[in-house]
Image (cartoon, rainbow, N blue to C red):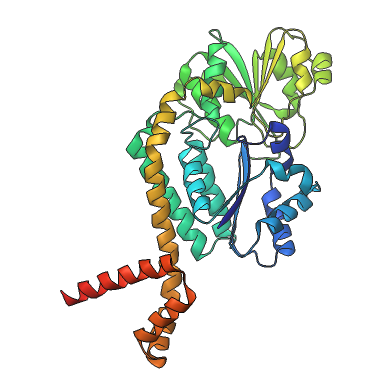
């Protein structure tokens, strides 16, 4: 397996915006890459607010994938190649486990990423982009991450971008403050709304589009109904006028709130906080230049995460040995699966070409001394076990 990664580790938001996938783009990207890379058999695409990563089979070269992705985006390979991290073989498996554990996230220990990896893998599986090798890798990596997070306690204090956003909103809210959420019917928007409603301190308004599913992704308790309302997306500027804090967590590829329209259409412009979690951003950054308004994008929360990550960093360091052990175990699974497929041919060849003696002589001719020493030690041990 190979991986190319655009993430917050190496990429500013402006670069992540270029490779972020909008709604439905995965359905177009994979066929496009397949048409440009004939050897592509397995691919899983992970796309979140902080990373776009392509996991693909060994037969496809990293260069082919980079060229295919940049061609799809109609950008220069030379301009963006320096922003990519690349991983291969065991390093790729180790990276995947770290990602699922939240150890590579902006917020260490982020639990949301495991769900996002499951969704990305599930999409690949349902659409025929994941075969035997990727099924082993992703299923075992998810198992590994669950074991590691439980064993270290890293999952006992989950902190996601959604949680940090809710904390930021509540820290700036008075009793009965009004919060408007674009994308409340989505995963992140729903989690933010759920946290705010559970606080009992704010009134939450969400927007919905009439031509889309407007059901909420969380359960509303009876005591929360008075503090939740929904308005049509087309009435967003009227809703902004009423709100104290505006949060965007949509997947819209377009700017949905502009500084110009806000200035023209909103009657109440006092002390507004705009929090834009979308990638690419979908609220005009110039909103922050308007008197009485503050604008934050998703990178703001990277600084917040640094303030409470010291203990989590210690837990991450304590987990490295477990990650290495799981990586080796998954790699062994892949090797044994490959070996199982050729065992009948090996047995037949040994019988036809003179038994084990001929195989051992072939080993000496074709392998270096370290390989021969390791195999010789194993064969001696194997022979000793057989004699017992």
Please state the horizontal and vertical placement of residue 327, each as a whole percent of the image: 43, 52
* 114 in relation to 248, above or below: below
Identify the image quadrant of residue 239. top right
On the question of residue 94 being in view, the answer is: yes
Please state the horizontal and vertical placement of residue 95, each as a whole percent of the image: 51, 46
Could you tell whether 251 is left or right of 357 in the image? right
* 99 in relation to 335, above or below: above
Instruction: Tell me the quadrant of the picture where the N terminus can be found.
Output: bottom right
Instruction: Tell me the quadrant of the picture where the C terminus can be found.
Output: bottom left
Could you tell whether 262 is left or right of 119 in the image? right
Foreground: 385 or 40?
385
- Residue plotted at (71% across, 7% down): 270
Foreground: 165 or 186?
165
On the question of residue 252 being in view, the answer is: no
Please state the horizontal and vertical placement of residue 223, each as a whole percent of the image: 45, 20
Identify the image quadrant of residue 207. top right
């Amino acid at each position: 397996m190979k991986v190319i990664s655009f993430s917050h580790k190496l990429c500013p938001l402006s670069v992540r915006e270029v490779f972020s996938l909008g709604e439905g783009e995965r359905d177009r990207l994979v066929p496009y890459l397949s048409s440009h890379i004939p050897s592509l058999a397995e691919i899983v695409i992970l796309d979140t607010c902080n990373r776009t990563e392509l996991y693909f089979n060994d037969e496809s070269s990293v260069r082919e994938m980079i060229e295919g992705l940049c061609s799809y985006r109609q950008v220069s390979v030379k301009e963006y190649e320096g922003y990519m991290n690349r991983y291969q073989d065991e390093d790729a498996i180790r990276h995947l486990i770290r990602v699922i554990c939240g150890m590579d996230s902006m917020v260490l220990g982020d639990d949301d990423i495991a769900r996002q990896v499951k969704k990305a893998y599930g999409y690949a599986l349902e659409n025929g982009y994941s075969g035997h090798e990727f099924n082993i890798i992703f299923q075992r990596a998810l198992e590994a991450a669950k074991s590691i997070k439980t064993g270290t306690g890293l999952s006992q204090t989950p902190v996601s971008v959604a949680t940090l956003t809710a904390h930021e909103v509540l820290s700036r809210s008075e009793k009965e403050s009004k919060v408007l959420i674009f994308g409340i019917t989505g995963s992140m928007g729903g989690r933010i709304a759920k946290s705010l409603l559970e606080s009992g301190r704010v009134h939450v308004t969400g927007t919905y589009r009439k031509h889309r599913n407007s059901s909420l992704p969380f359960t509303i308790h009876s005591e929360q109904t008075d503090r939740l309302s929904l308005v049509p997306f087309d009435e967003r500027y009227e809703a902004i006028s009423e709100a104290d804090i505006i949060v965007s967590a949509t997947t819209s590829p377009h700017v949905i709130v502009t500084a110009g329209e806000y200035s023209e259409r909103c009657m109440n412009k006092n002390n507004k906080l705009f929090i834009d979690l979308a990638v690419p951003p979908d609220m005009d950054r110039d909103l922050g230049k308007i008197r009485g308004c503050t604008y934050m994008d998703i990178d703001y929360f990277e600084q917040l995460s640094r303030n409470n990550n010291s203990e989590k960093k210690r837990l991450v360091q304590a987990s490295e040995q477990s990650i290495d052990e799981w990586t080796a175990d998954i790699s062994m699974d892949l090797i044994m699966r490959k070996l199982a497929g050729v065992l009948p041919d090996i047995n037949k060849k040994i019988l036809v070409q003179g038994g084990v003696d001929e195989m051992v002589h072939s080993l000496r001719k074709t392998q270096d001394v370290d390989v021969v020493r390791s195999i010789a030690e194993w064969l001696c041990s194997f022979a000793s076990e057989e004699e017992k």
